[in-house]
Image: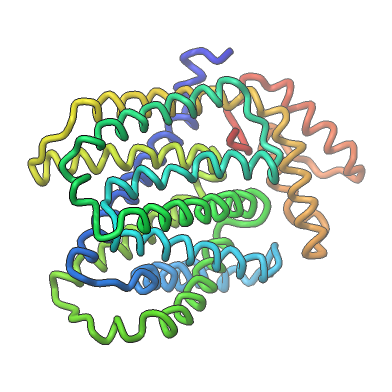
Amino acid sequence: MANLKEVLAKKTVVGLVLGQILSLLITSTGFSSSELARRGINAPTSQSLANYVMLAIVYGGILIYRKSGLKAKWYYYLLLGLVDVEANYLVVKAYQYTSITSIMLLDCWSIPSVILLTWLFLKTKYRFKKIAGVSICIAGLVLVIFSDVHAADRSQSGSSPIKGDFLVVAGATLYAVSNVSEEFFVKTADRIELMAMLGLFGAIISGIQISILEREELKSIHWSSGALLPYTGFAAAMFLFYSGVPVLLKMSGSTMLNLSLLTSDMWSVLIRIFAYHEKVDWMYFVAFAAVAVGLVVYSGFDKENHGEVVDEVEERSRYLDEEVGGVGSNKSYVAIGSSSSNSSSNSNSNKHESASSSERKTGSGTQIKKI
């Protein structure tokens, strides 16, 4: 059983802090999208295009400078780009039909979706303490839902709340697919490669979709300073969010990422209180505390699965190596769990020694897999 020292380990604290930074960034994108929708700008794919272009330029430049080949097949990134673009499109589109509160609440559908996908495809094992942490977080969200039932903004929930809610749930499901796929790539391929290829294919797919669905809408938009500011803010926040997501995925995994984003609703409440001087229900603060406790419970017991993680990540790396025809190009990820990674002519012996070393080092805070 983990003690307080383990819970407050450096990696746990870094994961929690990074998760809340990402939560604040996603909150800012929500307010930007809501402001653009209020101004009558209905171009969800165009909003995300700038983010993909920046990802392609920044991380693509780094990838070209490295002069190294891809560690995963290009068409995997194409599929990931398609899923990610459509997820962004559906959720941003939902702001035209329903309230920001409804969107942030229903977007939490990605959590059970991620848990199911990681269990099915990444073979993640969820122990009781992990499930307890998730349950506490979700309980906090239930409090928010009960509070929102009587909130004033629910009466102004948009032109078509049911349609908006459906778009959010569909988008959240695609977000779950995107998060789990990114977790696989960031742990078996490369973070820079992932961001560069996601930006490239995301920009291409967005460009095609804009020319089909939003060309006329863009012609009618008057880009005044009032509309340009939230658009620029959205693009900048999305770029920073996308840049930070792979770091948290590699450190703690997609379930931890989605649990951290639960607090985005609470951050939006605090912004409404201090920036807009609105009154909110006291249950919001209880919910915020519940989610915070759930995150600590979830992330405080990562060491228990460390011995099981090495074999799983090694298997994923070997699978990706076979796909690209490489010979051990991703083995460096397997060595993270041990204190040293000396070369040996016998690969089977190395695997056994690496797993054994991980089991013996019970004091190590290093972790490859999140759950």
The correct choice, above or below, for 158 with respect to 7 in the image is below
Quadrant that contains the N terminus = top right
Classify residue 147 as left or right of residue 181.
left
Q: Percent x, y for residue 362? A: 66, 19
Residue displayed at 58% across by 36% down: 370
> Which sits in the foreground, 310 or 79?
79
The correct choice, above or below, for 150 with respect to 225 in the image is above
Residue displayed at 37% across by 72% down: 50
> Which sits in the foreground, 260 or 338?
260
Q: Percent x, y for residue 291? A: 37, 29
Classify residue 134 as left or right of residue 162.
right
Q: Residue furthest left?
A: 277
Say whether residue 29 is visible: no
> Which sits in the foreground, 342 or 346?
346
Say whether residue 163 is visible: yes
Quadrant that contains the C terminus = top right
Image quadrant assignment for residue 122: top right
The correct choice, above or below, for 61 with respect to 186 in the image is below
Q: Percent x, y for residue 241? A: 39, 54
Residue displayed at 42% across by 29% down: 137
The correct choice, above or below, for 107 with respect to 194 in the image is above
Classify residue 206 as left or right of residue 40.
right
Q: Percent x, y for residue 248? A: 49, 44
